Amino acid sequence: MLKDFQADYIVVGSGFAGATIAERIASKLNRKVLVVEKREHIGGNSYDYYDENGFLIHKYGPHIFHTEKKWLWDYVSNFTDWRHYIHRVLAYIDGKKVPLPFNLNSLYGLFPTPKALRLEKKLLEKFGPGQKIHILELRSAQDQELKELADFIYRKVFLNYTLKQWGMRPEELSPEVTGRVPIFISRDNSYFQDRYQGIPHEGYTRIFERMLSHPNIKVLLRTDAREIIQLDFLYRRIYLNGREFQGRIIYTGPIDELLDFKYGELPYRSLRFQLEVHPVEYYQEVAVVNYPNDYAFTRITEFKHLTGQAHPKTMIAKEFPQEYRRDEPGKDIPYYPILREDEVEKYMRYRREIEKFDGKILLVGRLAEYKYLNMDKAIEGSLVLFENKIK
Ligand code: FAD
Ligand code: UDP
């Protein structure tokens, strides 16, 4: 079957990074692309599907598309219409549900009004309205009451959630991880402030089907690239099923795997989702409620809020963080790179090995770049790679 398809490019992985680069090469360069995907479906971690009850479910956790960049939004809009949706998250703290990121409304939700008034004034004076502050920055405040507030937010929002999510304390991770959820000096309850936000009208998988349904693209599912591609590091040659491959590879999988873990494994964090159907129209107020301090799960997602589906019952997913084990089914999905300085150095050693292939192997996406990328950034990485290194 493969013999009839003479690929110019092989793309490993069919998530947003892989699908975007494959789509660009096929439609803009009119070259043939073989997309190799080890799962039984396209779409990577953004994949969604309809279950037997008719619920549209995000298999790998809640995915909300958001970006500041119009050109990026326009690119994705070639493949979908959007359901207008502004993401809101509540955090369950001391028996109350308050907005997250922690903002002025959260402050009033958790403290008696006179104290909240005082704190609001101090926050506005020190940081200014509309500012987003890293928890570490708030913790370094001199004012005693602000310091106490910082300690409160650190303990009640970040510490236990991060211990559950990563098995580590916030300060053991790169500050960019907790920096994703700032303290927001505002009354705006939305989780993201990006100008463009939405949920694809017909789901994410439909986007991938449209991106990849091009006569120049062939998708090979249930195929681990390592079964069909061999790399000769000595002579810098690539083999496809034993025959030398003259084209280029765009790799979006884990980089340590590609190099047989020669510098050791890069750490990842995995997740387990527990799906539950409840015989009520709605289970909770918003799509995502975080539980920093209670239960073993970190958050509950109720999909109907995201998808806008009407249904007399509802489906929720409880999200349990777990160790990543590449040889253990159920734990073998590398959801998150664990960003720590020494690990990033290890990653760079792997990357330098790949660079020896003189551009015949290109790396893009969350796993191959070992970065905590949102969907817009994974797409952007591929669009930039296409413009700079491929076109
Ligand atoms: P992936 O989607 O991981 O795709 C990589 C693909 O490569 C996979 O399909 C994998 O099977 C395949 N692959 C790997 N190795 C091989 C191999 N050897 N052979 C063949 N195939 C291989 N982003 C947002 O913008 N908004 C959100 O709300 C959001 N929520 C998220 C929630 C969770 C729980 C998680 C984990 C991530 C979330 N993200 C979100 C991030 C989003 O999932 C990523 O940005 C996106 O999936 C990155 O795309 P990718 O193509 O780089 O990687
Ligand atoms: N975080 C936290 N408490 C929360 C939400 C987030 O401590 O209620 C921290 C935690 O370390 C988490 C990180 O901030 O991993 C990033 O959160 P985000 O919501 O961006 O996580 P994602 O949706 O990517 O899993």
Image (cartoon, rainbow, N blue to C red):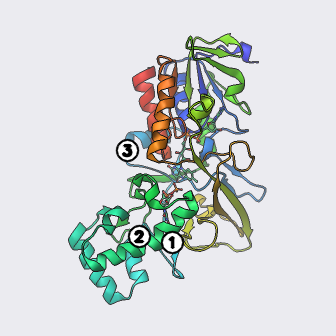
Q: Residue at image x 55%, y 73%? A: 293
Packing grade of label 3 (10 A; few <14, some 14-19, many >=20) is few
| Amino acid of disc 2 | Phe
- 147 lies left or right of 76: left
Quarter of the image that includes the N terminus = top right
Packing grade of label 2 (10 A; few <14, some 14-19, many >=20) is many
Q: CA distance from mark 3 to mark 1?
A: 29 Å
Tell me if the residue at label 1 has its CB under 8 Å from ligand 2: yes
Q: Which mark is residue 91?
A: 1
Of label 3 and label 2, which has the lower sequence position? Answer: 3
Residue 79 coordinates in the image, percent (x, y): 54, 39
Residue 247 coordinates in the image, percent (x, y): 57, 14
Q: Identify the residue position indicated by label 2 in the image.
A: 102
Q: Identify the residue position indicated by label 3 in the image.
A: 69
| Amino acid of disc 3 | Lys
Front-most of 59 and 54? 59
